[in-house]
Amino acid sequence: MTSRLVAHFDIDAFYASVEVRDNPQLRGLPVAVAGSHRRSVVLTATYEARPFGVRSAIPLYKARDMCPQLVVVPPNMSKYKDVSRQVFAIFGARGHLVEGLSMDEAFIDLGVVSMDEAKALTQAIRDEVLATTGLTVSAGIATGKLIAKIASDTCKPNGLLAIEPGAEEAFLHPLPVGRLWGVGPKTAARLETFGIRTIGAVAALDDATVRAIFGSWGLEVRELARGIDHRTVDPERETKSISSEETFEYDVRDEKALIAVLREQSKELAEKLNREDCSAGTVGVKIKRADFTVFGRQVHLEEPTRDVRRIFKAAVYCLRRAHLNGAPVRLLGLKVASLSLGEPKQIGLFEVRD
């Protein structure tokens, strides 16, 4: 029997795996890739570090407390990008549609094939990535994107898990509800108050209840919970936003210092927009205060831009709308969104609409 099947590929512990590959003395050790100052966060960690609770996005000081023997390696983004280009060249070499999600993660449309053919193709891609880059890739195969991704997550590291057509509900329903896309920790905690703990419980909800709990996207999330996922692999998937953030080693109160950071972030994002041949219609800032409260301000431009001066001007406008009044800032981020392809129109330097 043949079906249209999709595979999800995810390089195992990408940044850390590259560092271990290039320095064999790190093999078998708990390794984290992170910056050097006291507020750095872990970007990724080897599987030897994970039993201690070391995961991506946790503060480095917490990771060191959890795992005193942790080896910390500074990130080398240019190297990771080079490796990513090698891997994506392999993903696309056979002519299948590829939808990249990040530097180390992608969906591939395997076409209308038997499961045996899909497994053989997926394994051939994994073998080629290993032979070319020295990195292992976990992969999941299914009739839809959600299940393929959950399958690849489930079989990490260095695994291949295929969910046969017709077995989607049996695979999904016992899993925690937090494994569904769009259900984060806060939503999962709220669902707990309704007694909803598994994906199967979401699948069993009636129309009125699922709308009351999830709102306008309730029917869609129930379809996913039932293993029904009609989304196709889209190689032209729109990048919704580009962002840059900086966590300060010490809290910053001085507005001039914050503006200087926004200037550098504006340059970085303008360069990215030019490389991607995109223009942005929205500019926003993200602010995390010393008490860890997070909020943002954004403006919509009259016309999309990739001009660094307009991005910076809009960023400063957003910062001043936050009315910090000297409050200590722990993190400052800048985002450009509402992206469109091609050159922007030539208009005034800074025209926005709230």
Image (cartoon, helix red, strand yellow):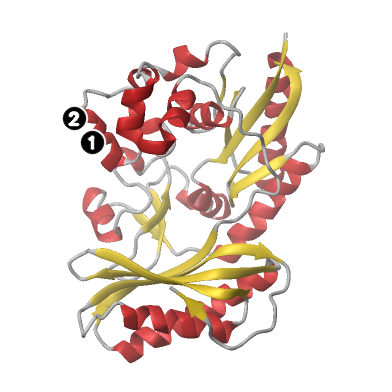
The numbered mark at residue 193 is 2
Q: Residue at x 30, y 31 (%)?
A: 212
Q: Number of numbered discs present?
A: 2
Real-space Cα separation, disc 1 to disc 2, in angstroms: 7 Å
Residue 72 appearing in the image = yes
Q: Residue at x 60, y 36 (%)?
A: 9
Q: Residue at x 38, y 41 (%)?
A: 48
Report which quarter residue 192 is drawn in. Answer: top left
Element under disc 1: helix
Q: Residues within 10 Å of mark 2 (few under 14, many from 20)?
A: few
Disc 1 + disc 2, Cβ < 8 Å: yes
Quadrant that contains the N terminus: top right
- Between 306 and 272, which is closer to the camera in this rendering? 306
User: Is 251 displayed left or right of 36 in the figure?
Assistant: left
Q: Residue at x 69, y 69 (%)?
A: 275
Amino acid type of the residue tagged 2 in the rendering? Thr
The residue singled out by tag 1 in the image is: 189
Element under disc 2: helix
Q: Position of residue 257 (x, y in %)?
A: 34, 88
